[in-house]
Amino acid sequence: MDLVLDGLTVVTNGRSLVDDLSLDVPSGKIVGLIGPNGSGKSTALRCVYRALRPSSGTVFLGRDELSDLPLRRSARLVAAMTQDGAVELDYTVEEVVALGRTPHGRGNAPLTRRERELCEKAMERLDVAHLARRGILGLSGGERQRVLLARALVQEPRILVLDEPTNHLDVRHQIELLSLLKAVGLTVLVVLHDLNLAAAVCDRIGVLSRGRLVTAGAPWNVLTPETIADVFGVEVTVVPHPLSGSPQLLYSLPVERPQP
């Protein structure tokens, strides 16, 4: 299912957080949003999973305007893993993952056998099955991240929205998560701060600065020294990854010269 942001604008207290953002996320592709802190990345995502109503502009899921869809319908189509997805109560891991089936259920009906199997497979895939009976508040940040992604996958969405999903993850689980995103075949809109991870996993990248889209395209076309210097204020050398060929950024750190 295609996801389209068409002229998305968000104004709060007279300040424009997102300004006329238009971006296409083709069906089955991974599109990343990158940019400095405060550039509007998370705000744009909040409009997609309906935590925020845009001041103007439209979000399309396929041919449908998101605002025209019943909440239950859009919740079945879009799953989100957010930075503020904290769980207040000490549910067990298996209970949290099962919450992903909420948009599909009616009342307090128990999970079907298929749904229980779906939860078990998601926990195994995210390497949290051994934590199933543990309370989520007692887990590390990385473990919680994997539990919340398992919950999102159990939702069986058509579109997956992820805000900094690699936060708190060790290197192994970062790589496994990004490999999973490529394997699931969903339409994915993801915010990433690590530009090399974005280059490795994303089919296309959109660069935001001060709420506006600076450029969008394939990683090699977007992650140029000129764009990185203009948007992030740092100097980089861009080289091909020796195995995948994706662009990799080598950062130039200031060199302190010894005082005479």
Image (cartoon, grey):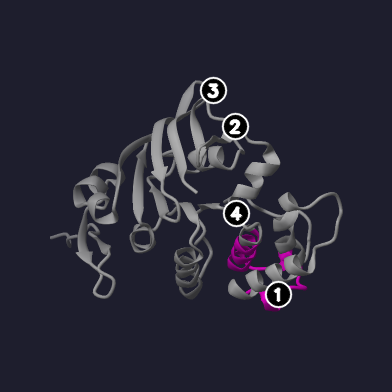
Where residue 125 sits, quadrant-wise, is: bottom right
Disc number lying in front (4 or 1): 4
What percent of the width, then of the height, locates residue 205? Answer: 35, 50
Mark 1 or 3, nearer chain start: 3
**Disc 2 residue type?**
Ser
Q: Which residue is mark 2?
A: 67
Q: Of the residues under marks 2 and 4, which one precedes in the sequence?
A: 2
Residue named by callout 3: 13
Horizontal and vertical percent position of residue 169: 52, 67
**Could you tell me which residue is drawn at 66 percent across and 43 percent down?**
73
Q: Position of residue 146 (x, y in %)?
A: 60, 66
For residue 255, side relative to residue 175 (left or right): left
Kindly identify which residue carries mark 1.
Answer: 131
From what the image shows, is residue 189 above or below residue 12?
below
Q: Is residue 142 magenta?
A: yes
- CA–CA distance in space, label 2 to label 4: 17 Å
The part of the image, by quadrant, that contains residue 200 is bottom left
Q: Which element type, helix, strand or loop, lies under badge 4? A: loop
Q: Which residues are magenta?
A: 127-151
In this view, the residue in front, 133 or 140, is 133
The CA span between labels 2 and 1 is 38 Å
Mark 2 vs mark 1, foreground winner is 2
**Residue 157 marker:** 4
Q: Residues within 10 Å of mark 2 (few under 14, many from 20)?
A: some
Indicate the quadrant containing the C terminus: top left, top right, bottom left or bottom right: bottom left
Front of the two marks 2 and 3: 2
Within-10-Å neighbours for mark 1: few <14, some 14–19, many 20+: some
Say if residue 90 shows up in the picture: yes
2 or 1: tag closer to the N-terminus: 2
